[in-house]
Image: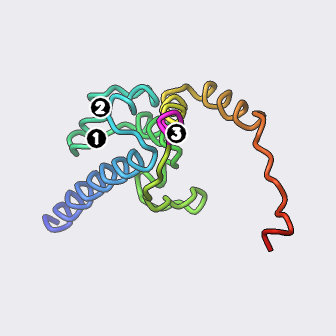
Amino acid sequence: MAVLLSMLRTMRIVRKMDIAYRLDLAMRVAGIKTQAQLARLSGVPESTIARILKNTGQPSIENLVALASALNRSLDWIVNGTDSKTAPLPELIDIHVTHEELLIIQQHRAATAMGRSIIRAAATSAEKKKLEPPSELDN
């Protein structure tokens, strides 16, 4: 019986560590650099996010749902690391952007869900550069 209880405690600790790891990974992929940013996006208090990332305390389902939503991940992925419905995390790659592009990205990330929808709609409907068809000289 003592062995079983020890195994259950160990599983609980490992699961909490996995939640912290996946939360940290999802933050990095989303470009969220601070716990304060995630708190603003999710509505979860910064102190609660800090406790989750430090593996202290037991996060509530409500907080995990809010965090998963803000990070565009499923609750199943945050808790268990499995979910066939959620797109796999992309590899982190270096992309060079201008200062203006970086500001737009930061504004998008700081916006509410409605604000992000408006930004996407504006980007979709914005006038685009016309690509010239290749000339015969290019052949």
The magenta stretch spans which residues? 98-102
77 or 24, which is in the foreground? Answer: 24
Mark 2 or mark 3, which has the lower sequence index?
2
In the image, 95 versus 111, the foreground residue is: 95
Q: Is 22 above or below relative to 97?
A: below
Task: Confirm or deny contact between disc 3 and disc 1 (CB under 8 A).
Answer: no
- Specify few, some or many for label 2: CA neighbours under 10 Å numbering under 14, 14-19, or 20 or more: some
Horizontal side of 119 relative to 130 (left or right) equals left
In the rendered image, residue 58, in percent from the top left (x then y), is placed at 28, 41
Q: Amino acid at mark 2?
A: Thr
Dot 3 alpha-carbon crowd within 10 angstroms: few under 14, some 14 to 19, many 20 or more: some
Q: Which residue is mark 2?
A: 48
Mark 1 residue type: Ile
Q: Position of residue 59 (x, y in %)?
A: 33, 39
The quarter of the rendered structure image containing the N terminus is bottom left
Quarter of image, res 121:
top right
Q: Secondary structure at mark 1?
A: helix
Q: Is residue 100 magenta?
A: yes
What residue sits right under mark 3 in the picture? 69
The residue under label 1 is: 52
- Residue at 60% across / 58% down in the picture? 85
